[in-house]
Image (cartoon, grey):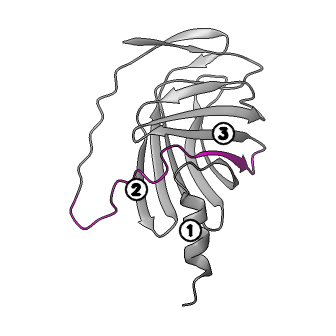
C-alpha cells in the first residue's frame, strides 16, 4: 500500500489488480498523448487539467469548479487510438476528494472513461463520483479541450492532416 497526499488528508490506497486482455486487430494502445497537457472544460463547470506524464500515468489538477486545487496522480492510465485524432482514455481512481470545499477523502474506487477528439478539441467523459452520504452517482459530462503543452507536436500534426485535400 502507498500513501498519497490529497488536499486535507492522507489516503492509504489499495493496490489495484489491473488486468488487460488485448485482442489483435482492435484499438491499439497509444503513446501519442505522452507529454500533452490540456484543460478539459466540462459542462458541469469543472475545469480539469490533464497531464499525460507517461504511457501509464496521468496527473490531473482541478483548475476550477468542485475540484479546484486538488491534484491526483493516476498510475492506471490507458490510452487507445480509435481513429485518427480520436482516443479512448481510461483510468481508475482508487480514491478521490468529493469537493475541495469539504476536503473529504472517498476511497471507494472510481473508474473513468473519456472519448477525446483532438481534431475537434471535444471530449465526452463517463464516470462515477462520490456523494457526501457515502454513495456514488454516475455522470456523463462533455467538454471542450484547451491544449496547453504538446511536446510531440500531435495537435499540429492533426491540424496538418485535416487541412490536406481529400
Mark 1 or mark 3: name the one nearer the start of the chain: 3
Relative horizontal placement of residue 18, taking residue 54 as reference (left or right)? left
Distance from disc 3 to disc 2, alpha carbons, whole Å, reads: 19 Å
Distance from disc 1 to disc 3, alpha carbons, whole Å, reads: 21 Å
In the image, residue 138 lies at what x, y percent? 58, 44
In the displayed structure, 131 sits above or below 3; it is below
| Residue drawn at 40 percent across, 38 percent down | 56
> Could you tell me if residue 118 is visible in this image?
no
> Toward which corner of the image does residue 30 lie, by quadrant?
bottom left
> Toward which corner of the image does residue 104 lie, by quadrant?
top right
> Toward which corner of the image does residue 135 lie, by quadrant?
top right
| Prevalent SS, magenta region | loop
Judged from the image, the secondary structure of the residue bearing numbered disc 1 is helix
Question: From the image, which quarter does the C terminus lie in?
Answer: bottom right
Q: Which span of residues is magenta-colored?
A: 23-44
Judged from the image, the secondary structure of the residue bearing numbered disc 3 is strand
Distance from disc 2 to disc 1, alpha carbons, whole Å, reads: 16 Å
Is residue 83 covered in magenta?
no
Amino acid at each position: 500500500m502507498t500513501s498519497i497526499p490529497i488536499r486535507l488528508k492522507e489516503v492509504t490506497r489499495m493496490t489495484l489488480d489491473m488486468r488487460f486482455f488485448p485482442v489483435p486487430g482492435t484499438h491499439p494502445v497509444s503513446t501519442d498523448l505522452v507529454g500533452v497537457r490540456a484543460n478539459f472544460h466540462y459542462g458541469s463547470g469543472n475545469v480539469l487539467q490533464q497531464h499525460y506524464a507517461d504511457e501509464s500515468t496521468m496527473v490531473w489538477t482541478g483548475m476550477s469548479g468542485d475540484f479546484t486545487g486538488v491534484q491526483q496522480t493516476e498510475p492506471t492510465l490507458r490510452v487507445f487510438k480509435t481513429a485518427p485524432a480520436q482516443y479512448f482514455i481510461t483510468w481508475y481512481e482508487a480514491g478521490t476528494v468529493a469537493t475541495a470545499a469539504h476536503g473529504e477523502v472517498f476511497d471507494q474506487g472510481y473508474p473513468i472513461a473519456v472519448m477525446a477528439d483532438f481534431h475537434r478539441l471535444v471530449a465526452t467523459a463517463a464516470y462515477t463520483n462520490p456523494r457526501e452520504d457515502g454513495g456514488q452517482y454516475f455522470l456523463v459530462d462533455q467538454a471542450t479541450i484547451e491544449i496547453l503543452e504538446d511536446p510531440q507536436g500531435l495537435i499540429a500534426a492533426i491540424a496538418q492532416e485535416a487541412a490536406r485535400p481529400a
